[in-house]
Amino acid sequence: MSRVAEGVSPLELADYQKAVRLVLRHPLITPGYPDKAALATVRRWADQLRTDLMEVLGHRLVTTADTARLQRAQDGLDATRPALTRAGRPFDRRRYAYLVLTLAALGRHGAQAALGELADAVAADAVRIDGLGLDTARKPDRDAFVDAVTWLTERGALTLADGSATAWAGDPERAEALYDIDREILLAVHHPTRVLQHLTSVMSLLDSAGALGMSAGRAAQRRDQARRARRLVLENPVAYFADADTELLGQLRAPALAEDLERLTGLTVERRAEGVALIDTSGRLSDLRFPGGGTVAQAALLLAARISAAVQRSGRHALELLPAPTAAERLAARARRIDAALPSRGPVAELAGLAEPEEVPVYAAPGDEGQEPAETRYPFVTDSWLRGRLKEITAEYGAGFAADLRGDPDRLLDQALDLLAGMSLIARVDGGALALPLLARYRGVTARVKTRTAAQLPPRTALFADDIAKDPTP
């Protein structure tokens, strides 16, 4: 029997699980973020949360008077949870850079900061970084900077005392904004577990010892692997058995994993022949819903149905089967892309002793050295085939798509494939994509374009899926 939430009565278990989902979905909780009730909910259960999150997942919960900060144990690099702009779009590299420089500049300010002065401080630092800069005379630079400031404002690190950031972005000569600075929240926003100046690779941010079973003692290894397996199921749409090493595979199949996660989160663990998934049909924990609304999600759903139909073909029309990159190979590829942006000169490189970018290792599980892993192959569809299917989808359902994406099919296809890959439905590879087992859940999707009448405002068309999966994964 699971020992999770041992001190919680059956009558209060649902409230406790709500607190668990809150802190897992929002690793930083403040008096106003994500809402005014969240911090009180988490603080009520803080002691039990600290115990269970460490025991089950290896996460550390730090609470103060005005913050609850979850320090996650990280096993991989996840590109599916970006910071978002005021318009809901993912941050680009410029915005991330402005966010980091703004945090640094705020550390040198007092209790308040004027937006124009803060922009000047960030600009002074940005000009020393090749290819960055911040020119407050340029509207795109001002917009990017305000997106970074707004991200901090939403979390309570900054509070608008006077003026308007939007007005400043429109005309900094005529408008200004004044912010109060919350030092406690500011510290919680940026709380690294490593000394960043000493890192030579993003891989150093990962909890590789625990993730790779390298702790001292066999019992500690099993504990670390069990935590890693629970994190894998919790933080991904599906944990495929084909991606797991021998020891992790045993933990994924253990009955205790489902018992612990179900009691901790209040959700249901589903087991299939190919892997394990934590099912969140209500959206209580998921940060990304699929199927979902919007042009990209609609196009992705219809594209998933067409890929799934192609997978069912047999005989001479059957798709070619190819191996997917392993989890370790995908991690190494992401790390190389991130490490390519590390400064090769300057004080950071000198502190880190960085001469040449280090080779990112691909790890094997202990005891697996010299063994050839079993190769799993998946149906492959080419880029040209995908472009053709999207063209068909756009011709049939394009009336319900956003005009800018309908007119840019390459961008729509790229975003739709990224969404499918983020949901573990496909794996993107050179020349096309591989259909993963979870894609079969969306087999047989049908859709229709529903046109609103003139009395229904706003007058536009919308796409609706008539036959979608009943149990979308997180």
Image: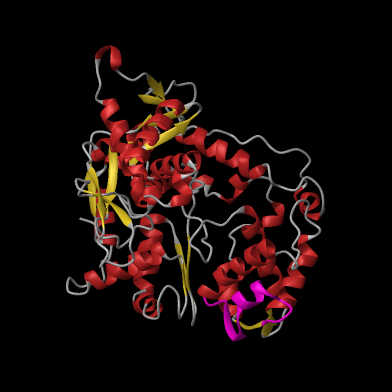
Residue 244 visible in the picture? no
Q: From what the image shows, is residue 363 above or below residue 14?
A: above
Give the image location of residue 293, x and y in percent.
33, 55
**Quadrant that contains the N terminus:** bottom left
Q: Tell me, yes or no, if residue 42 can be seen here.
A: yes
Residue located at (52% from left, 56% from top): 90
The answer to whether 54 is drawn above or below residue 199 in the figure is below
**Coloration mode:** secondary structure
Residue lying furthest front: 454
| Residue sitting nearer the eye, 182 or 301 | 301
Residue furthest toward the top? 316
The residue furthest bottom is: 162
Region in magenta: 155-176
The x, y position of residue 318, in whole percent, is 30, 18
Q: Is residue 39 above or below residue 139?
A: below
Residue that appears at 75% across and 67% down: 137
Task: Decide whether residue 171 is among the magenta residues.
Answer: yes
Is 359 displayed left or right of 418 in the figure?
A: right
